Image (spheres, grey):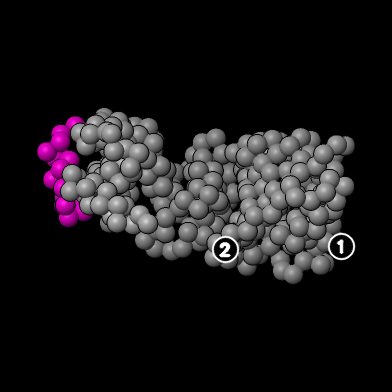
Amino acid sequence: MRTVFSTDAVAEQERHEYWQELASKVFLGLRTERKKPGPFFGRLDHRDAGPLGVTYLHSSAQSVHRGETEIARAPRECYFLCMQVAGVCRLRQGREERFSHPGDVELFDGTRPGEISFDADYRRIVIVAPYSTLRPRLSHPDEMVGSVLHTREGVGALVAAYLRAFAENQVAEPVAGSVSENLLDLLALAFNTQGRNIQTNTASVREARRHALRVYVEQHLAEPSLSPATAAAHFHMSTRYLHGLFAEAGESFMRWVLSRRLARCRKALEDPDMGVRSIADIAFSWGFQDLTHFGRAFKKAYGMTPRDWRQERALQRTYRRP
């Protein structure tokens, strides 16, 4: 269930108090302080995903404190996994002060005091994970308090892509294991191996790589040159490894490409605003180069020719009119 909260409808003089109450409820206890005078705003877009709470937030500059009082009031023990989307976060938990920039992921232990601070408007994704789901996955949990994972390359880059897609509810359920379990495995792996240049074939990493390939396909569907070789080169992997990733999910790369192109064409054929475009134009615009091949593939997938599909949907719209 998705819930969106905002200070927009609240009187200016009551906004920060409203935000404090709201944020404390969503994040299981905290105290906020404004950093700058002037208008204040805050927005939370929250949903539950299995055992995890997922929140996308956008707010004015502020500092956020979690002290012994807030911890004592918390209904359960948890970790906060926070990905900075815009702005810079200063994090202090344990002995060190660290900074996270857009793309970085912070590991905040909700059972220990700490503070995060933002000097300007910011956006971030916060995953609330029950202690029991993440702590057993961490190799040295007490040493990782207040860690910041930099996500420019390697497993960290996969974490950033997967976490963002997870927060936006765009990650499909994998063949084995739940999406939330996959995310926790991937996050734990990244924090456990941070600073070590290793290659791994764990299931979570392979699922994240599959997801990255699918996103790449969606972004390049209109390009006739899209192929296993071009995709593998983009991700610095062999075509054999790429084919293995898709085979594990019971798919093939080019069948996936074909199914996505056909789906885009079908959607265009159903769109009355696309009625002035020819079927050939639509097919070519989504990467097809052979109309005969397109027609046969479309009929095999949807049981009728592209022309019949378009006409039938047009008739259905006519019958539905009052």
From the viewer's perspective, tell me whether residue 156 is left or right of residue 213. right
Q: Is residue 302 magenta?
A: yes
Q: Nearer the viewer, residue 178 or 188?
A: 178
Q: Which residues are magenta?
A: 288-305
Pick whichever, 83 or 237, lies toward us.
83
Looking at the rendered image, the disc whose residue lies closer to the viewer, 2 or 1, is 2
Image quadrant in which you'd find residue 122: top right
Residue at 22% across, 52% down: 312
- Answer few, some or many: residues within 10 Å of disc 2's Cα (few below 14, many 20 plus, some between 14 and 19): few
Counting from the top left corner in percent of width and height, residue 198 is at 48, 43
Percent position of residue 201, x then y? 41, 50
- Taking the spot 50% from the left edge, 43% from the top edge, the residue there is 161
Residue 72 horizontal side relative to residue 260, left or right: right
- Depicted 23 relative to depicted 155: above or below: below
Residue located 54% across and 46% down the image: 164
Mark 2 to mark 1: distance in Å? 30 Å
**Hey, what amino acid is under mark 1?**
Thr
| Residue with the mark numbered 1 | 69
* Location of the N terminus (image quadrant): bottom right
